[in-house]
Amino acid sequence: MTTEIPFTYAQQLLLGLEQAVPGSVVNSTFIVRAAYRVAHEVDAGVLRLAVDDVVARHDALRTAVSRDPDGEVRARVHESAPGRLLVHDVDDEDAFLAMATGSAYPPEEPPLLWVHLGRCADGTSLLVIVAHHLTSDAWSLPLLARDLSDAYTARLRGGPPPGSAVMGYAEVAADDFSPAWERTITDALPYWKERLDGVAELAMPVPTPGRRGDQRTCRFPVPGPLWRDLGRVARRRRTTPFTLLLTAFTASVWAGRHDAVVPVITAGRKPSEWYTAGFMLNMLWLRITTGDPADLDELSRRADEACRAAYRHDVPLLRVLPEAPELAAVMFDPSEVVERTFPVFQLIPRTPFAPTAEDPALVLTPVPEERQPAPVMPVHLLWSMRVDEEVVGIVAYEAAMFGRDWVEAKVAGFLRVLERLADA
């Protein structure tokens, strides 16, 4: 039995991109993934039951996204769906991680969760969790890992599996169109109309106009002492480390520009939705008029103001775009050759999820980010900062538009600005 549900505003934004560039999101490679090491062998039979439990708990994973013969894209929730566990013997760990990320994951065949268990020769295990991005996001992955650990522990020890007492994704989709949320959105739109007036003209020219296709990744660490210094500076200035990262991004990637427009990806979640898996990301377009771009104190102050105002008016981008139609034309530009773009920034924080059992039977230790192949994202340049045990920058970019030298120069400039901010 299936039930058709409305797409959330976040999903509708993705489908707008799909309409402009067919195949960009409704495909088998648009995924999110997370890899973990387990310091012991994993019982595959118990893990299979735990995967079933996780799929039963989150209706987003049981949602099929498909295109009907009339061309309409629809979401249908299946009442039940068996989990997918794929077991492998692993000789080459990097090859295993690449295979798990590079396989095909069709969005029309639920459940949209695939768990790869790799059995290593030394008795340890690797676990790769893959979900289709149409129904999951970066926030969802550690939540799914937590639930998988809880379910495995319960199944192994004969206890009851985790229940389904979590806000369903279908409820989130319905809440998007509630009268209360509509009033909040309506009140926020005048702010965005004023802030985004004329921003399409401020798009950044790409270094080499080119076609979408070959996406590559540049990773870099933020040294621990530097990150700690930035935290102290943020507290002293009554701001956040995110604002300082955004300041460095603006000063380096938008170097020399007096008016920067930075799309920032947010989790798009209220506290009541923290434990719900699904695609809920939002994007806030921060307009930062820099004055003197070399004045980092002033730039960080303006970045802080822009962040605070944007988050006070945080409503779905899909509803904002009609107030800035020129911006929508840039976002959904179907041109084969891309000449101008807006580099996107995001912070991926450590999420507040940990196994609920005092002595979990499945302890998942994240595989370092640099060992995990990067999934393909439908943006021209995405600058992510992942905060976990270490702070790692990940720049995903279209190779035809942004050469490696250009990206590495921007990374070097970004780190120099962080050092200057930390010394302030």
Image (cartoon, rainbow, N blue to C red):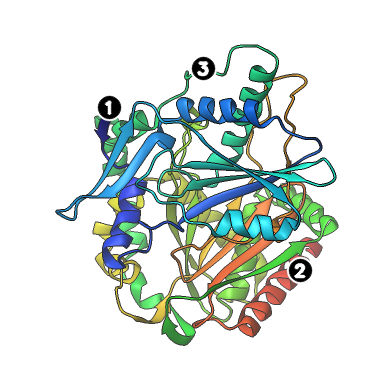
Picture layout, residue 172 above or below residue 411: above
Q: Position of residue 302 (x, y in %)?
A: 55, 61
Q: Which residue matches tag 3?
A: 163
Specify whether 351 is left or right of 92.
Answer: left
Q: How crowded is mark 1: few (under 14 residues within 10 Å), some or many (20 or more)?
A: few
Specify whether 400 is left or right of 142.
Answer: left
Q: Position of residue 308 (x, y in %)?
A: 51, 49
Q: How far apart are marks 2 and 3 (CA)?
A: 50 Å
Tag 2 near tag 3, CB within 8 Å: no
Q: How crowded is mark 2: few (under 14 residues within 10 Å), some or many (20 or more)?
A: few
Outermost bottom residue: 208
For marks 1 and 3, the one nearer the N-term is 1
For this rendering, which residue is in front, 50 or 332?
A: 50
The residue at the point 58 percent across, 83 percent down is 403
Q: Which mark is residue 420?
A: 2
Q: Where is residue 14 in the image (x, y as percent from the top left)?
A: 35, 55
Residue 298 visible in rendering: no
- Residue 4 quadrant: top left
Q: Residue 1 carries which label?
A: 1
For marks 2 and 3, the one nearer the N-term is 3
Q: Which amino acid does label 3 sit on?
A: Gly
- Kindly report which numbered mark, 2 or 3, lies closer to the viewer in this rendering: 3
Q: Which amino acid does label 2 sit on?
A: Arg
